[in-house]
Image (cartoon, rainbow, N blue to C red):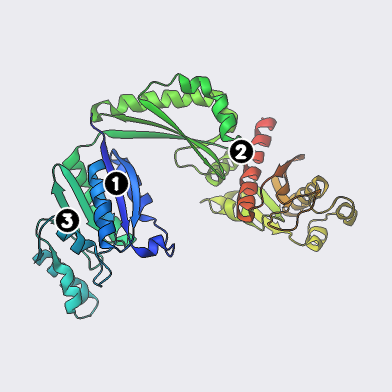
Amino acid sequence: MKTIQAEILTIGDEILYGQITDTNSQWISEQLTSIGIKVIRKTSVGDEGSEMVKAIQEAELRADLIIITGGLGPTSDDLTKPVLTQYFNTRLILHEEALKDLTAFFERRGRELTEINRQQAYLPASCTIIRNYYGTAPGMWFERNGKVLISMPGVPYEMKAMITEQLIPKIRAFFNPPVIIHKMIRTSGIGESFLADKIKSWEESLPSFIKLAYLPSLDGVRLRLTAITDKEKETETDNFLEKEQERLREIIEDYIYGYGEDNQEQALGKLLIKHKLTIGSAESCTGGMVSATITSAPGSSEYFKGGIVSYDNEVKINVLGVKKETLAEYGAVSEATVIEMVNGVQKLLKTDIAVATTGIAGPGGGSAEKPVGTIWIAVRIKNKTKTKKLQLGNIRENNIKMTTYAVFNLIRETLREKN
């Protein structure tokens, strides 16, 4: 069983300058993985012909499939087509299909096909055209020594249409790739090293054809199980991975919030619907991020009642009922204050669950006693309150996101204790 390896090249100075984000490579990787092709490298190259040639030569040594996006426009800085013409030792010829598509494209928009745009119908003689029904730059398919090089425009919606409508079936037919199966287990509330230690025996018992990857992020650690198999053994292998996933669940069930494509907010929503619970929030340091994240999940209107952003102490006092004496004695960033916040918002919104956050998100505002990253969170379910103190870093955006997901995790912990 031969693994088919792919390399993705993105062309354009604007990517290297950081003026646009390369989302194409991520999307292409997902599509290739879904049909059993392993992406081994992604490279960004500027608008420099010699660098493009060098990158293609190196990719051809490593990969079976090379996919290039970008550099196919009609202007002088778009070099992909002339570079590929030279690379494959061929010449440009007028492709009638490409000219037909271009003419139709401009006619639909009531515009004249200019000579500069007509040049886009000239393609290398040795390529197979990939028709572009949504733009002006056709794609190109080259074959040499059992390998394939594909060049497409960098405009995402044009490229995506080409891949889904034309290239996936063609790539699959050419390579007949094996099947790549992934199982994703999503955890929260435990760090990567602690998780690795906890599942060490299970990991060491995995058969060699199953690979485990740790994927840490701000919202937790994802564990990815991967196996590569033949089409004939797909069901058998999938069942085997399911059993290993179940073995893992028995070890770390308390930390698992979802599987596959589940995110934390969707998993929380399912949990609240299952228990028929409503929720509301009182936020200071997170500035509404908890509410926004909860409501980003479809169907959140079934359980989310509302939220109060009590950024200023006057709002804490006048809306949530936090005592002036509490703030004076303990400060806004304290367990005492977060408890009164969560009690106040539950009473105000009449919810089954209430959550609250208060802290120093940074990068300034800290002290020796309460450094930046000091945050208190609280969850109140029915008449039971649970609090937690977080000691995070000094990156404001990260602190806000990590606090939000810590709140979600505390909700799950509290619900487990109640059950």
The amino acid sitting under disc 3 is Tyr
Which quadrant does the C terminus fall into? Answer: top right
Vertical comparison of 105 with 408: above or below: below
Q: Tag 1 or tag 2, which sits nearer the N-term? A: 1
Q: Is residue 243 above or below residue 109?
A: above
> Does dot 3 land on a helix, a strand or a loop?
helix
Which residue does the image show at 19% across and 47% down from the upper left? 148
Element carrying mark 2: helix
Residue drawn at x 23%, y 68% is: 136
- What numbered label is drawn on residue 301? none
Residue count near mark 3 (Cα–Cα under 10 Å), binned few <14, some 14–19, many ≥20? few
Camera-side mark, 2 or 1 = 1
| Residue 70 shown left or right of residue 383 in the figure | left
User: What residue would you read off at disc 1?
Assistant: 7
The quarter of the rendered structure image containing the N terminus is: top left
What's the mark number on residue 87?
A: 3
What type is the residue that disc 2 sits on? His
To which residue does mark 2 refer? Answer: 275
Query: Is residue 63 at least partly visible in the picture?
Result: no
In the image, is 340 to the left or to the right of 50?
A: right
Cα distance between the residues tagged 3 and 2: 63 Å
**Residue placed most toward the observer, 161 or 142:** 142
The crowd level at tag 1 (other Cα within 10 Å; few <14, some 14-19, many 20+) is many
How far across and down, in percent of the image, does residue 376 sit?
A: 74, 46
Q: Nearer the viewer, mark 1 or mark 3?
A: 3
Report the Cα–Cα distance between label 1 and label 3: 17 Å
- From the top left corner, tell me how far across and down residue 314 is, in percent: 81, 63
Any part of residue 374 in sight: yes
| Of labels 3 and 2, the one closer to you | 3
**Figure check: 182 above or below 408:** above
Sequence order check, earlier mark of 1 and 3: 1
Amino acid tagged 1: Glu
